[in-house]
Image (cartoon, helix red, strand yellow):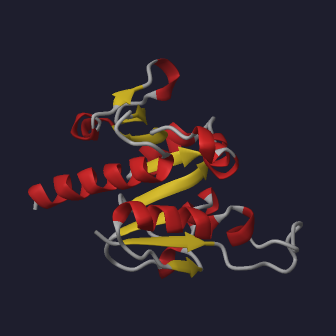
């Protein structure tokens, strides 16, 4: 399984010019944790979704990226807005998403990590032993996953992407 992360390139005119988006969002830390969980090296590209490789999964840290490149079912959006995450998933057909507050909790409070907080395709929940949160955390095709077999967000993401990868291979 191949994973690439895309982060906005540095913008010296940005309001927070003392920190790049890559630094502010702790992209390298998250990508490192994903790589450890997956047993692979994950490159980080400072660019747009159009710069992503043609194969494998793409981790995107900015919703604005979705308008800058091809829409794809291989994209996992990090820092999604809670009010629009399900609409973004349905509209763009993304593989999944992590809401801003959940990602912030991972960044700031790893000692209290759990295997939950990933929005994913409902049909994959059983394959990773996940339950779906009820109510407003579901749409036609997506739901908020929680799986006790995963100890933290990166391991849940990797388990989910591996299940998706297997599902895609079995339909080819």
In-image side of 3 versus 27 (left or right): left
On screen, residue 21 versus residue 117, left or right, reads: right
**Relative side of 127 to 153, left or right:** left
Residue 11 on image: x %, y %: 79, 78
Q: Residue at x 69, y 61 (%)?
A: 25
The image shows residue 5, relative to residue 142, as above or below, that is below
- Which is more toward the observer, 32 or 7? 32
Image coordinates of residue 169 in percent, x first then y, are 14, 61
- Residue 132 location (% of width, % of height): 38, 27
Does the rendering let one see residue 71?
Answer: no
Q: Quick check: can you spot residue 3?
A: yes
Q: Quadrant of the C terminus?
A: bottom left
Residue ID at (47%, 18%): 135
Rendered view: 139 above or below 89:
above
**Is 43 positioned to the left or the right of 62 in the image?**
left
Q: Residue at x 56, y 62 (%)?
A: 30
């Amino acid at each position: 399984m191949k994973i690439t992360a895309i982060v906005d390139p540095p913008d010296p005119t940005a309001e927070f010019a003392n920190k790049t988006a890559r630094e502010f969002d702790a992209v390298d830390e998250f990508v490192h944790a994903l790589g450890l969980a997956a047993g692979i090296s994950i490159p980080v590209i400072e660019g747009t979704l159009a710069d992503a490789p043609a194969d494998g999964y793409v981790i995107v840290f900015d919703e604005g990226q979705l308008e800058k490149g091809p829409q794809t079912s291989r994209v996992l959006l990090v820092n999604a807005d809670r009010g629009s995450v399900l609409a973004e998933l349905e509209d763009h057909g993304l593989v999944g998403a992590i809401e801003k507050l959940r990602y912030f909790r991972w960044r700031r409070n790893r000692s209290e990590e759990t295997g939950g907080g990933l929005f994913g395709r409902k049909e994959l929940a059983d394959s990773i032993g996940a339950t779906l949160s009820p109510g407003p955390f579901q749409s036609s095709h997506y739901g908020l996953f929680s799986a006790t077999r995963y100890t933290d967000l990166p391991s849940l993401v990797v388990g989910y992407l591996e299940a998706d990868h297997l599902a895609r291979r079995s339909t080819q």
